[in-house]
Amino acid sequence: MLCLLNHTRPEWVDIAAADINSLLIDHAHCEKKAATNALSMIKLYPQHENIVREMLTIMKEEWDHFEQVYSRILIQGAHLTKDRGNEYAKRLSDHIRKDEPQRMLDLLLVDALIEARSCERFSLLAACPSIPAELRSFYKELFASEASHYTTFTELARAHFPSDIVKHRLHELAKIEASIVDTLGNLPTMHG
Amino acid sequence: MLCLLNHTRPEWVDIAAADINSLLIDHAHCEKKAATNALSMIKLYPQHENIVREMLTIMKEEWDHFEQVYSRILIQGAHLTKDRGNEYAKRLSDHIRKDEPQRMLDLLLVDALIEARSCERFSLLAACPSIPAELRSFYKELFASEASHYTTFTELARAHFPSDIVKHRLHELAKIEASIVDTLGNLPTMHG
């Protein structure tokens, strides 16, 4: 799927479906962090109009998702709790190079990979028969939205860097991402 | 105005009006930081539904303002540049106490004060004859929006703390805020 080099371990979807409240709470934090990330890209690259404009749009969409997920948490009779962190995103972000312009390329491609993995996970949730139909429809909508964000991030990378460099680095980071995902798949969280 | 204990030095509005591009660029960063701040409040206090709900709304409004200010920067033929920081907000934030629950009270009241000061500055800009009428109308709209945010932050403080404690601490912080503002007023920035 998209640029991903492996599949999530099959047991993950059952672990997630068995604890929907924990999944929703972690998911809300993921949407919040995606919004924070869009703000951070504008802070880092204010001079690039294409980055600012795309982040403006992504920010609104992530925020709309946060609101929807938050409402579902309350409907479930649950409450938003403190963010326990995202080991997957943290480990992947450790591979972002420090110097520009490599940093910008890596930030865009790590964002693209996180969107791609979220897409794969949404598609697994959307197809899981033990999840209520209405919630499965919601995950299906999110799949489409996050797939579009994946495209946005890779297109921004190609707008700023030669396509062979983008392709090569995306493949390098995708290998790292796949190796991280191989060690996960046992928690009721979006990237656990 | 609102809880403020002094007025901005009268020369500020002329300094700001004489360099509208710098003012707009700094203003865009202020709106971005207000959005970041709303996200940060949700991160710190996810368990409080009234805080999450109000920050959801404030976030959308600040983001809409950012988009409007950003468009105006481009219409002016200018470009968004790196944020040079906000000495005013930084100095005021130094007075936020570290321990809870005092930290929550101070965060809400410092936010309220920043919104109040922004209101005062928008009202000065809206009344400045050397600023184009269309831009003055924009500042007038923002005045109303930020005044409503001031109310939201003080009401949240009163929802979580006894009103006499809120009143006392708001006055203490307003004195600090006024003393900071007395040293400013000479830069073409929103709080300069």
Image: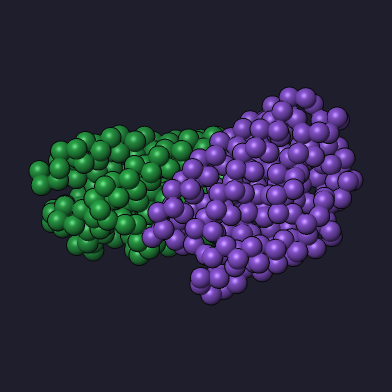
Chain colours: A purple, B green
Q: Relative to the observer, which residue lies in front, B174 or B153? A: B153
Q: Is residue A10 left or right of residue A117?
A: right
Identify the residue at image location x=35%, y=51%.
B28
Report whether A110 appears left or right of A36.
right
Q: Quadrant of residue A71?
A: top right
Left or right: A43 as drawn, with respect to A162: left
Measured from the top left, where is residue B172 in percent x and y? 36, 52
Answer above or below: position of B4 versus A107: above
Residue at the spot 70% in from the left edge and 63% down from the top edge = A171
Horizontal side of A77 relative to A131 (left or right) equals left
Residue B171 in the image, given as x and y percentages of width and height? 35, 48
Taking A2 as reference, is B56 above or below it? above
Residue B147 at least partly seen: no
Seen at 67% across and 53% down, the residue is A114
Q: Count numbered badges in the picture.
A: 0
Name the outermost residue toward the right: A11
